[in-house]
Image (spheres, helix red, strand yellow):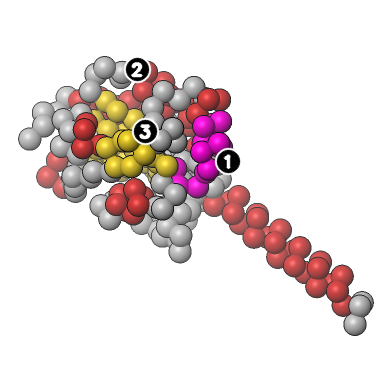
Amino acid sequence: MRLRHPRRRASAALVAGLALVGLLAACSGGDDGARTPDDVTDQGYQSGDGSATTWKVSDRKGPVELAGTDFDGNPVDTADWQGDVVVLNTWYANCPPCRAEAPDLVALAHQYDGQGVHVLGINGTDAAGAAQAFQRQFEVPYPSLADSDGAAVADLQGTVPINAVPTTVVLDRDGRVAARILGLAEGSTLSAIVDDLLAEQPS
């Protein structure tokens, strides 16, 4: 009987290793080729290819209003930003594409500071320490909702599918979903979207 235990441990280790590989692949942000923006996994997350979708004014859904506290315990409510463009970004600290896109999001926040644009992160994975370390490392100037209960993602998911981490959703001046990027967001793409929305007038 004792001879069977090492085999069971080896099998368990192999299964755990395969599960870890699958988890890392889900956050790779690589181009999977076969996936489409409407694919959904059991957890609502998968890798994204950076594809951007925009909606014309007549097709936009919303408004989206998210509220909660950031990782410093300060209240955040997107309703306070009515009339401004809002960039929402889901992330967590150990996600490679989240780290890769962070400098572009930080640059965007600085570029449009004082111009009626707000950036808000949404993190439902990390404890405060890990999230704050990420924010310090990348000198993030904008808040992130501590979404441990998943309420913010659920509210957003009710309006637009959030099928990858990271996902970036851009709200127009009326709080409606105007654009979505699944996977790593390129700075130039985000800037072009924001510029177009700033040129619009709120209804």
Q: Which residue is mark 3?
A: 74
Is 169 left, or right, of 100 in this rendering? Answer: left
Q: Which residue is mark 1?
A: 94
Indicate the amino acid at tag 2.
Answer: Gln
Instruction: Provide residue 133's location: percent of width, then percent of height.
Output: 56, 31
Q: Is residue 124 magenta?
A: yes
Q: Which residues are magenta?
A: 123-134
Instruction: Provide residue 65's location: percent of width, then percent of height.
Output: 23, 43
Q: Secondary structure at mark 1?
A: loop
Looking at the image, is mark 3 or mark 2 earlier in the sequence? 3
Q: Is residue 197 visible?
A: no
Residue 153 position (above or below residue 198)? below
Query: What is the residue that sits farthest to the left in this orientation?
Result: 203
Looking at the rendered image, the disc whose residue lies closer to the viewer, 3 or 2, is 3
Q: Name the residue nearer the viewer: 71 or 20.
A: 71
Looking at the image, is mark 2 or mark 1 earlier in the sequence? 1
Looking at the rendered image, the disc whose residue lies closer to the viewer, 3 or 1, is 3
What residue appears at the point 28 percent right and 43 percent down from the top-left corner? Answer: 66
Q: Secondary structure at mark 3?
A: loop
Mark 1 neighbour class, 10 Å CA radius: few under 14, some 14 to 19, many 20 or more: some
Q: Which residue is mark 2?
A: 111
Instruction: Provide residue 104's location: percent of width, then percent of height.
Output: 44, 26
Circle on res. 106: none
Indicate the amino acid at tag 1.
Answer: Asn
What residue appears at the point 41 percent right and 28 percent down from the top-left corner? Answer: 105
Looking at the image, is mark 3 or mark 1 earlier in the sequence? 3
